[in-house]
Amino acid sequence: MYRSKLLSLVFVIVLIVTSLLGCQQKAPSPAAQDQKNITIVIPEDPPSFNPIITDTGYDALVMELVLLGLSDIDPQGNIFPELAAELPTVENGGVLYDESAGTMSVTWKMRQDVQWSDGTPVTADDVIFTYNAIVNPETGGWIPGIDYIDSIDKIDDHTFTINYNAIYPAYLTQFGGEQVAIWPAHYCDATQGFASWDCARKPLSDGPFVLSEWVSGDHMTFTRNEKYFEKGKPALDKITINIVPDQTVRKTMLINGDADLDMWTTEPIIADLKGNSNIEVNPSPTNRFVMRIFFNLAAKGTTDPVATPHPILSDVRVRQAIRAAIDVDTISKEFFLGYAQPDWTEFFRPPYTCANIPRPKFDLAAASALLDEAGWKDTDGDGVRECRGCKTAKEGYVMEMEFITYSEFGEPLELTQQFIAEQLGKLGMKLKLTVVEGSVLWAASTDGGIEQNGNFDMDIWDDGYSGVDPTAFIESYYSTAAATPDAGYNFMRWTNPDFENLLSSTYTLDEQLRKDAFCKMAAILDKELPELQLFTALNADAHSINLQNVQSSTNDVVTWNSADWVLK
């Protein structure tokens, strides 16, 4: 009893002393109070600082903080020099080409005032080192147009010429933009290979910030790069990136002031943030990601639509019926809270927009008539159509398929999947719904990838091209070469010689010719419908109103201009 009271008395005295000492502690120094620090929240760790290899978006987010490319693209689609002193053009003599021979050379002049954070100058040697690392057949990677380069010649420490074996119109952003950075030749270990070298986890910076700490699964810390070439920038002293998997927690942190920026804010969270005067939601000027349905034109489990055509989807009238039966406006209103914008062509973004493709009509009667015409009828009254004179399946074959989506997008997409299945069910098409992880859906064929192996009937997910030039994206999705498993993303196994010829014609510097070709390609896609574009999902980032100069972009991730961010 006595011991207990004595211990209690000692505890009280300790509390009083601690309190008094706390009162005597110094207040934060003026320098500490002047620190301009912000916190960004994202759901998962970046795999590395090299988005060419993994392309999660979070790798690009951190890459933009520490690494520069020759050029970049602003939200309005304007290309601007970064490591380059100027953009090479035909007019300034930087680009020489022979249209008849189909060759060109591009000479880049680099800034001479850019250093790596260890004080080493950034030079042409770093560009050539990066190129050689990418094209290494055993340990390299791939970027759009890399196959069109024959060689790179060094002129001097800050000048080099890229020699192309074709006319490559997207040359200005080939070594820049959203995914490609220049890596330090004196720091990265080439023997480790571009796909897995250590400097992709511990990069040397020539950007506005320097990585100072990375605790996997918890946070990353970036501090101001004192050797950054733009005088007076960046304005921020420190950026902390916290890994917060739960989007509701990220929203709460933003509301409570524990976070300053949330990347890729979803439509439901944007709706929850409405009316909060301390938070600004910043959408990009144009959308990028298109929600689309991929049709497998080959029988499920195969990849050759000629030898084994799909019993249902190989008939274009069936694909057209599916398009007519989907109410995109209701999907936007009910599941994407009005933020989704209808889209029905690949060519909807400036400068390549095509007005020759009218918006498809939601018309269940027309959809039903198309299925009747194709020989799919419900003759037994069970609500599901069968092949009755169709030319793609055996007589009596039931119109039943699997419809897949990926889990990571979340509830809006799963509700969309269910709604489409209900609408097609009313039409007499029975769909079995499956939700899988994106890593399984998109994996290589050797890793059991569903799409690459053709193990699907139809699926739905979102994708679109970054930057301002759609050629590489279109080639990777619709060319004959891309229909080979693991050679591209032509999961539909669709081929069209006229389309192929038009695609080849876009490899020119004649912009009017390119625009005309793109719109002719759009007409072919609209007629044959190998994919079904539905709508664009919103591209937006939410941030504190005190964090200024944030600009969301379709052409890059939000950190593209982090050197210009100001904390009010």
Image (cartoon, rainbow, N blue to C red):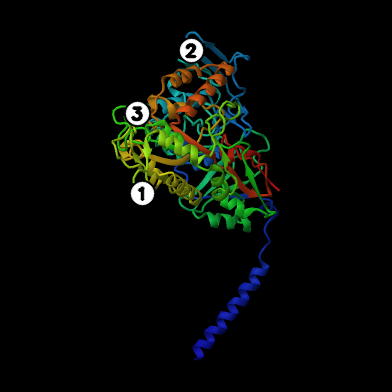
Q: Position of residue 264 (x, y in %)?
A: 55, 45
Q: Regarding mark 2 in the picture, which secondary structure is present there? A: strand
Q: Position of residue 170 (x, y in %)?
A: 53, 23
Numbered marks: total:
3
In the displayed structure image, the side of residue 400 where residue 172 appears, left or right: right
Question: In terms of depth relative to the viewer, which is nearer, 476 or 125?
Answer: 476
Toward the bottom, the furthest residue is: 1
In primary-sequence order, the first of circles 2 and 1 is 2
Q: Please, what is the three-letter code of the amino acid marked with disc 3?
A: Thr
What mark, if any, has residue 103 been given in the picture? 2
Q: Give the residue at mark 3.
A: 484
Q: Position of residue 433 (x, y in %)?
A: 39, 48
Ranked by sequence position, the earlier of labels 3 and 2 is: 2
Q: Position of residue 44 (x, y in %)?
A: 47, 49
Asked if residue 234 is positioned above or below residue 243 in the image, the reply reads above
Crowding around mark 2 (Cα neighbors within 10 Å: few <14, some 14 to 19, many 20+) is: some
Mark 2 and mark 1 residues within 8 Å of each other at the beta carbon: no
* Alpha carbons under labels 3 and 2: distance apart: 27 Å
Point out which mark residue 106 bears: none
Residue 300 visible in the shown view: yes
Which residue is disc 1 drawn over?
382
Above-or-below relation of 16 to 44:
below
Q: What secondary structure is marked by label 1?
A: loop
Q: Report, in whole angstroms, how far the alpha carbon at label 1 lies from the one at label 3.
A: 39 Å
Hey, which quadrant is residue 395 in on the image? top left
